[in-house]
Image: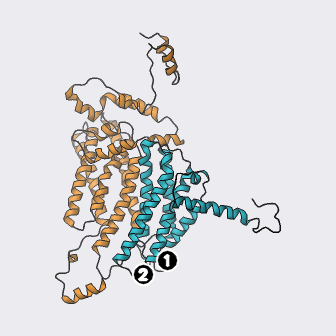
Chain colours: A cyan, B orange
Amino acid sequence: MAEAEESPGDPGTASSRPLMRDLKAVGKKFMHVLYPRKSNTLLRDWDLWGPLILCVTLALMLQRDSVDSEKDGGPQFAEVFVIVWFGAVTITLNSKLLGGNISFFQSLCVLGYCILPLTVALLICRLVLLADPGPVNFMVRLFVVIVMFAWSIVASTAFLADSQPPNRRALAVYPVFLFYFVISWMILTFTPQ
Amino acid sequence: MAAVDDLQFEEFGNAATSLAANPDATTVNIEDPGETPKHQPGPPRGSGREEDDELLGNDDSDKTELLAGQKKSSPFWTFEYYQTFFDVDTYQVFDRIKGSLLPIPGKNFVRLYIRSNPDLYGPFWICATLVFAIAISGNLSNFLIHLGEKTYHYVPEFRKVSIAATIIYAYAWLVPLALWGFLMWRNSKVMNIVSYSFLEIVCVYGYSLFIYIPTAILWIIPQKAVRWILVMIALGISGSVLAMTFWPAVREDNRRVALATVVTIVLLHMLLSVGCLAYFFDAPEMDHLPTTTATPNQTVAAAKSS
């Protein structure tokens, strides 16, 4: 979608302008997740760049050191990836089978973007873990993860709940709860070697 | 009395218009096959036969067979076919879970709660929750048991999630498959009044596993006696749900075969719970009582390491 010509005084090249536009769209959606209101932006202009960036960040930071790999340690990069995407697809299928009127990719987009608070929690946890370990350290991490978990749930429910008939709303929201709970658990139990 | 014209089979949309045209006419209106079983008044029954009817579902079995055929009319490669397995509301799922927790003697779970509307939502998500409940509780319990050990380094044991998933989903699908095959085989030899479809059996098994979710969470308590009491309670509840569901399906058969079937069902259930307890939860060892009997050197060392 590069433009045919550009004027000499143009700040961006032909290939960076669509890139900036995409980055701005992703950033705007991040803001919508951090301050969830009932807006349609996430649903209307869905994209999967944000979820991909978040998932890769999460998987990179959660993976255990392959050099020091214990037999029953934390998840590998691929395992985190699979859990996030497989979980999101399963929740979306579940929502559609229950009769929701949200499209497949819209739902993936919402679920992926709402991992943002948990990614922030992971970053905070890594910083907190640089301090000396102990029960206070654990309490701080626990508090942060719980708050971010609640934030993720609230953000995704704000977008997804309206797409379900009211007598099945709880059935569609529960898997979302389970999904973010499992991710929170992986973040909380993350122990660097 | 209705005119002959009005007794002809009507299209769905025309019922309203024909009623509007001729308010005295009777029209047969089959709107939603899924709703009709609930609205059946049923013939007046003698009180003695009520219990049997609940168990056997004699009176409505013909109608529900027909309606079940009507419901799943989409070919299996369309999305709508699979949507029929998720045709449940929130209160129905809660009712079924409640029914699996409170087995009433004489009431058949399938006839009472499922009523020809087996769903896959309950079994799938109960199994998913159970997988994570067992893996996370096992991890937590091991952490608490080994807390304070100098040589113990906490690991999240992520591998165990996939093992738990394999075990639980295999149990929830393969055992019903084997049981269904067995019941079909016996049905061909002995005419049984009650027969269940494969999905109904999967549904019963899925909902009967619900009791293990709080059990797995309570297994964190590192006391052997408590854990075994929990195993017994959970087995009692879910085992009785299964036994009361499948007893009517085999009781027409040879006495020994019927008893063997029910005993095998309960035994497999027990195997699952005991196996999960043994594999995912470390035994609380005896030398993990508070170090009151330790020598002064050891207590000093323990204090330094914590």
Give the SS element for disc 2: loop
Q: What is the chain letter for disc 2? A: A
Chain under numbered label 1 = A
- In this rendering, the label closer to the viewer, 2 or 1: 2
Instruction: Indicate the amino acid at tag 1.
Output: Ser
Residue denoted by label 1: A66
Query: Dot 1 lies on which element?
Result: loop
Query: Do the numbered discs 2 and 1 sit on residues whose CB atoms are within 8 Å?
Result: no
Characterize the local packing of mark 1: few (<14), some (14-19) or many (20 or more) Cα atoms within 10 angstroms: few
**Which disc number belongs to residue B252?**
none
On screen, A62 above or below A149? below
- Same-chain status of marks 2 and 1: yes
Q: Residue B190: where, in percent of width, then height?
A: 30, 35
Horizontal placement of A2 versus B237: left or right? Answer: right
Q: What residue is at 32 percent from the left and 56 percent from the top?
A: B213
Residue B261: give x, y in percent of width and height.
27, 46
What whole-number distance in Å separates the C-alpha atoms at marks 2 and 1? 24 Å
Say which residue appears at 52% left-offset and 21% top-offset. B14
Q: Is residue B306 left or right of residue B289?
A: right
Q: Quadrant of residue A71?
A: bottom left
Residue type at numbered disc 2: Ala
Q: Give me the disc on residue A131.
A: 2
